[in-house]
């Protein structure tokens, strides 16, 4: 997605009913809140980008009198006797959009007092493909007002319901004004609509039916609904009829002088005298008592200010001769013409000769052709140098005469000698020039191909519906030019592009920022239908390689529709991965609109067959869980009901047998129970069952879908009442651990204690007798070694009373000590005997300790072995229990599937006995 392609992906559903994607009718109030639609997010990004393109890095010199007129019209604190409508009128490319954008920017920076906050809504027709649709404008306006005034009770129609939107506009304004009155703080509303004459209805006609037919002075926009209501101003812009001599020099222009009264208030006549050349839109606005502000061409002082401001902002210096030449040119009174001239002059490094050439252009088509020629020369610079290097190489020296065999004749007259020399020269030229000629031809071919690179890029931008990202730009032009050339071209195009930040798909897109260049690319470069369809197919092929993301949802179906690839569009709409993103709250209205277009233009499709095929492929490849499968059935059923209720004009009533009823089938299953669920979950399951049953008002497609998919729908319900046989997670982990080999502990380490066995499952299994007897025998074989008795005997040898024999014995009497030699010898012999005895006891003690240590090690090993055997025995018992449960669950599933099969056989889709008598009554409803 992001797509991307961020692309939103559905997370894995948990094994509980709350993880199932519910239809809108079954959601609670918190879950069913409307989210911002994809159309709204796309348009908001495009309008913000269009406004930034007229402010950031854009040279704009304001006309103070025009700003004063707009400020005076929006002075809410004064009672105004004029209409709330003010129309900014001017020729194409005269700066109407820039005037409104910069005035709004100044208005926002002024920070009106907190007691009188303002809600400013901006809509610029022509900044995107959908911005000219009346339904999109009304939807954006009412969505903005609903959010600004917290109109929770106001029900906003969908973006494609044009008639409902027109009738809801007055109620929206009424609710907004009522909410401000109740809160005690009035919010003033300013609506800025640029290019009102470009708004089109569903049938492509120009219409101002959304405006009241009469707006008397002193009344507000919806004065027909609420009398004497103030607080709304509408600023519009419209284009005057283009004249043959639209471009003129600024030296010929004399602007109208504005006067001020004694209070320094601007005195301006807002009335516009009738003109036979007025368009229908201007006549209708005059009939609604709208005021008019005519934007005049640039005069000499304004042109001079723009040139100096451009030089100051870009840190360049333009000499006086160049300034005079620019001001003398025929189009210097047009802001767009002047901007293009200054940009091209900077890119040419202030070449005076080039400036003289471009100043001869008398219209925008000629001027843009010069722009393309300049880009062409800049992009072909490396190839031109390479071609010159190949064609200007010095000639090679001729090879020696021995390279060709001489004639056999021995006569050496002059004629034969000259012929032989000429043959040598020709062979030499052919052999040496062949590689160079191939390189020259290749370079010329690359030059011809790159010469159209700028047209190719502009055509791609004009064909794309919502713009191209930098990645899209490079990949679509990858075969046309190397990356450094593509980077250079994008840098040249940036002054003519606007940057769109898409928050929903986390991507930055670029699109043409001015309508004049877009019209040139669309109606001059792409005037051939086959060429235009080729560009649509190129973008469609590129988008088909994208992963499932919002970017692919936006661009792919539009391109397929433009090139009339109805089969591919049908596959795009029924693809399961795409459908899960299509039927999101943001995209479902666009999804229904594409189905309406497909039904109108491609009548051979059958949505039920298409979704059956796509769902079968999805199940085979992805293997979804039963919860995911149930969510898909719910969403597809919801779509078919919505599509047939809103768009399908043919109602088919077939005399067929009664279809199988899901509710009756589930109730017939003895194991179906909702007792283990909460009240909320139980109500959700009951609602799901009722939703997947045929309703009385269901049409042919919904009934056929529910009938044909009854087996899979019933299968998707199996976990809702067979889930109690599924082993818990801790048991499953125990089974997985039993498969892995047990760790072998070191003899010196303590054996790890075996984990406590899992809690017994409610449905306990009885072990077979053979298995139980085997386990009992193993238990008897495992003898327990008790070294306690031998250990005590060994410790008796270590009597502390036998130690400490090195001291001398005291005499029996306390008299004098006998120091005779025999006595000393006797004592020495006794000491030696005791020493020998102590040495013997020490040796026995060491042997006893060694035996005790060996027995202790054996006891540890036996204990570890016993623990491992005990753990293995418990795991074996658990595995047997799980196998028994799986066997029971499998038997339950088998019986359940057999009951589904019997239900399908009992309720066949076609009765063979009555097939000859079946009739179809087709009632065609009026469109």
Image (spheres, rainbow, N blue to C red):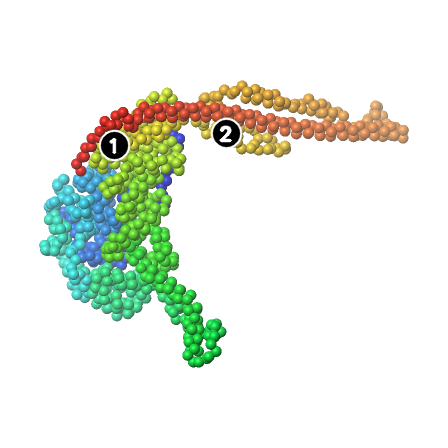
Instruction: State the residue at coordinates (20%, 36%).
Output: 649
Relative placement, left or right, of 75 versus 404 is left
Sequence-first disc among 2 and 1: 1
Report, in whole angstroms, how far the alpha carbon at label 2 lies from the one at label 1.
Answer: 49 Å
Whole-percent x and y of residue 60? Answer: 25, 58
Vertical comparison of 209 with 761: above or below: below
Q: Depth check: 243 or 257 in front? A: 243
Whole-percent x and y of residue 261? Answer: 13, 56
**In this rendering, does residue 850 appear at all?**
yes
Q: Depth check: 63 or 434 in front? A: 434
The residue beneath circle 2 is 735
Q: Quadrant of residue 522?
A: bottom left
Instruction: State the residue at coordinates (21%, 38%).
Output: 179
The residue beneath circle 1 is 700
- Give the SS element for disc 2: helix
Relative placement, left or right, of 841 versus 383 is right
Relative placement, left or right, of 87 versus 383 is left
The mark closer to the camera, 2 or 1, is 1
Whole-percent x and y of residue 192? Answer: 21, 49
Instruction: State the residue at coordinates (21%, 40%).
Output: 161
Q: Depth check: 199 or 391 in front? A: 391
Number of residues whose C-alpha sits closer than 10 Å to that of mark 1, classed few (under 14), some (14–19) or many (20 or more): some
Q: Depth check: 360 or 449 in front? A: 449
- Give the SS element for disc 1: helix
């Amino acid at each position: 997605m992001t797509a991307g392609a961020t692309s939103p992906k559905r997370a894995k559903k948990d094994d509980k009913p709350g993880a199932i994607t519910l239809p809108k009718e079954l959601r609670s109030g918190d879950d069913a809140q409307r989210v911002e639609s994809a159309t709204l997010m796309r348009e908001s990004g495009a309008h913000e980008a269009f406004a930034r393109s007229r402010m950031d890095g854009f040279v704009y010199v304001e006309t103070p009198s025009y700003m004063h007129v707009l400020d005076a019209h929006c002075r809410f604190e004064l009672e105004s006797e004029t209409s709330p409508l003010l129309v900014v009128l001017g020729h194409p490319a005269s700066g109407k959009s820039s005037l409104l954008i910069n005035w709004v920017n100044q208005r926002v920076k002024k920070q009106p007092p907190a007691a009188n906050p303002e809600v400013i809504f901006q809509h610029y027709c022509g900044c995107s493909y959908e911005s000219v649709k009346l339904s999109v404008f009304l939807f954006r306006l009412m969505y903005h007002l609903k959010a600004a005034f917290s109109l929770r009770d106001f029900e906003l129609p969908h973006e494609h319901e044009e008639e409902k939107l027109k009738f809801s506009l007055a109620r929206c304004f009424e609710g907004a004004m009522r909410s401000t009155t109740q809160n005690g703080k009035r919010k003033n509303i300013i609506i800025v609509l640029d290019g009102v004459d470009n708004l089109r209805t569903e049938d492509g006609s120009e219409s101002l039916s959304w405006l009241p037919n009469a707006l008397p002075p002193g009344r507000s926009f919806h004065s027909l609904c609420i009398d004497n209501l103030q607080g709304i101003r509408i600023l519009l812009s419209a284009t005057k009829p283009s004249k043959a001599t639209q471009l003129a020099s600024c030296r010929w222009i004399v602007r109208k002088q504005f006067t001020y009264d004694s209070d320094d208030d601007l005195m301006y006549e807002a009335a516009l005298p009738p003109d036979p050349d007025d368009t229908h839109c201007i006549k209708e606005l005059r009939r609604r008592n709208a005021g008019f502000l005519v934007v005049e061409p640039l005069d000499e002082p304004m042109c001079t200010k723009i040139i100096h401001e451009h030089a100051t902002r870009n840190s360049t210096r333009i000499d006086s001769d160049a300034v005079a030449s620019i001001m003398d040119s025929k189009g210097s009174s047009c802001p767009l013409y002047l901007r293009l001239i200054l940009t091209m002059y900077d890119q040419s490094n202030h070449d005076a000769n080039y400036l003289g050439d471009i100043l001869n252009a008398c219209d925008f088509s000629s001027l843009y052709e010069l722009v393309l020629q300049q880009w062409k020369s800049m992009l072909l610079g490396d190839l031109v140098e390479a071609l010159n290097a190949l064609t200007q190489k010095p000639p090679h020296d001729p090879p020696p005469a021995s390279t060709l065999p001489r004639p056999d004749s021995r006569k050496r007259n002059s004629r034969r000698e000259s012929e032989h020399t000429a043959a040598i020269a020709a062979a030499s030229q052919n052999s040496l020039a062949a590689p160079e000629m191939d390189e020259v031809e290749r370079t010329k071919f690359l030059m011809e191909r790159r010469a159209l690179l700028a047209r190719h890029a502009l055509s791609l931008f004009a064909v794309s519906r919502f713009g191209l990202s930098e990645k899209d730009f490079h990949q679509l032009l990858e075969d046309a030019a190397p990356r450094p050339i593509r980077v250079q071209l994008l840098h040249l195009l940036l002054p003519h592009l606007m940057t769109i930040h898409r928050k929903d798909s986390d991507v930055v897109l670029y699109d043409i920022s001015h309508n004049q260049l877009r019209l040139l690319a669309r109606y001059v470069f792409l005037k051939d239908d086959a060429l235009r369809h080729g560009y649509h197919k190129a973008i469609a092929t590129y988008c088909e390689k994208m992963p499932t993301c919002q970017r692919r949802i936006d661009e792919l179906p539009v391109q397929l529709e433009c090139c009339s690839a109805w089969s591919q569009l049908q596959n795009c709409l029924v693809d399961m991965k795409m459908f899960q993103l299509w039927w999101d709250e943001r995209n479902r209205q666009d999804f229904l609109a594409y189905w309406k277009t497909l039904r109108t233009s491609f009548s051979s499709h059958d949505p039920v067959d298409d979704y059956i095929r796509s769902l079968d492929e999805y199940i085979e490849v992805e293997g979804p869980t039963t919860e995911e499968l149930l969510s898909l059935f719910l969403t597809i059923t919801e779509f078919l009901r919505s599509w047939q209720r809103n768009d399908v004009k043919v109602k088919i009533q077939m005399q067929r047998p009664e279809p199988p009823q899901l509710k009756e089938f589930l109730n017939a299953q003895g194991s179906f129970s909702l007792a283990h669920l909460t009240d909320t979950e139980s109500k959700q399951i009951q609602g799901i069952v009722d939703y997947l049953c045929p309703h009385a008002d269901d049409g042919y497609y919904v009934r056929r879908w529910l009938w044909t998919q009854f087996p899979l729908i019933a299968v998707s319900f199996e976990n809702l009442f067979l889930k109690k046989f599924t082993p818990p997670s801790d048991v499953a982990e125990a089974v997985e651990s039993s498969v892995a080999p047990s760790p072998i502990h070191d003899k010196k380490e303590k054996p790890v204690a075996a984990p406590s066995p899992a809690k017994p499952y409610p449905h306990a299994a009885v072990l077979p007798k053979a298995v139980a007897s085997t386990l009992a025998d193993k238990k008897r074989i495992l003898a327990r070694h008790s070294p306690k008795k031998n250990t005590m005997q060994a410790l008796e040898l270590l009597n502390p009373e036998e130690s400490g024999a090195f001291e001398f014995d005291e005499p029996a009497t306390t008299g004098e000590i006998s120091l005779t030699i025999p006595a000393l010898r006797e004592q020495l012999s006794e000491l030696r005997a005791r020493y020998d005895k102590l040495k013997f006891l020490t040796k026995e003690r060491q042997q006893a300790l060694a035996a005790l240590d060996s027995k202790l090690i054996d006891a540890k090993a036996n204990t570890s072995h016993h623990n491992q055997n005990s753990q293995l025995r418990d795991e074996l018992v658990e595995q047997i229990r799980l196998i028994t449960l799986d066997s029971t669950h499998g038997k339950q599933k088998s019986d359940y599937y057999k009951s589904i099969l019997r239900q399908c056989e009992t309720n066949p889709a076609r009765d063979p006995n009555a097939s000859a008598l079946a009739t179809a009554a087709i009632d065609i409803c009026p469109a």
